[in-house]
């Protein structure tokens, strides 16, 4: 495992897993949110994001944490392993809520710029997105992972207990 994608709904624990995996295998983490977000929840244009992503993808080793569906198929051309967090919606909604409360008023380390956590209209959009993620993307993700290059190892987690067990071995 040298080039790893971690995908799944927001609030599933992708970043937490990425950091724990980094500690176990000593491969650097690239947070897509860090590439995408600038100060005060302003984001960069698609072209600039693609350039930053390309610079990360050509490196020999990485763990990329995040979805950004527009670039998922492209990123899969570079990876050797995909971890898909296929969690129930309720688990992810709880994860988002917990994350907001734990980081309220602070910027998380995995974010670009100064993007403090707080409740606002954007968070309402995030909850709506989390709520509809499995309905909109689950079939597409499973289809994409089934039609992958056979040299890509795919691990699908259905719950946090499976993630914990994986990290313990």
Image: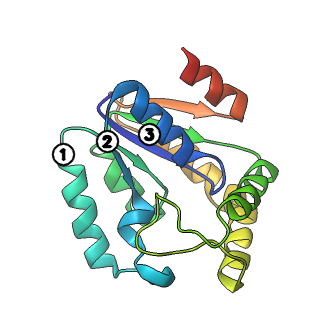
Point out the residue furthest to the top here: 169
Mark 1 and mark 2 in contact? Answer it, CB < 8 Å: yes
Question: Quick one: label 1 or label 2, which is nearer the N terminus?
Answer: 2
Mark 3 and mark 1 in contact? Answer it, CB < 8 Å: no
Residue 111 visible from this viewpoint: yes
User: Label 1: which residue?
Assistant: 59
Mark 1 residue crowding within 10 angstroms, few (<14) / some (14–19) / many (20+): few
Q: Which mark is residue 143?
A: none
How many numbered callouts?
3
User: Label 3: which residue?
Assistant: 147
Point out the residue furthest to the right here: 90
Q: Is residue 131 above or below residue 24?
A: below
| Residue 101 locus on image (x, y percent) | 74, 63
User: Label 2: which residue?
Assistant: 28
Horizontal side of residue 50 vs 43, given as left or right:
left
Image quarter where the N terminus lies is: top left
Q: CA distance from mark 3 to mark 2?
A: 27 Å
Which secondary structure lies at badge 1?
Answer: loop
| Residue 32 locus on image (x, y percent) | 41, 60
Viewer-nearest of discs 3 and 1: 1
């Amino acid at each position: 495992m040298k080039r790893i994608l971690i995908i799944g709904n927001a609030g599933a624990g992708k970043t937490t897993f990425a950091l724990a995996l980094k500690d176990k295998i000593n491969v650097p983490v690239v947070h897509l949110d860090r590439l995408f977000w600038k100060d005060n929840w302003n984001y960069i244009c698609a072209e600039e994001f693609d350039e930053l992503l390309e610079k990360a993808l050509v490196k020999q080793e990485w763990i990329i944490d995040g979805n950004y569906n527009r670039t998922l198929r492209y990123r899969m051309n570079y990876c050797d392993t995909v971890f898909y967090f296929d969690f129930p919606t309720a688990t992810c909604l709880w994860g988002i809520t917990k994350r907001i409360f734990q980081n309220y008023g602070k910027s998380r380390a995995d974010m670009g710029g100064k993007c403090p956590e707080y409740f606002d209209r954007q968070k309402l959009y995030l909850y709506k997105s989390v709520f509809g993620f499995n309905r909109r993307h689950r079939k597409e993700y499973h289809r994409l992972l089934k039609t992958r290059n056979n040299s890509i190892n795919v691990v699908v987690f259905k719950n946090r207990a499976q993630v914990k067990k994986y990290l313990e071995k």
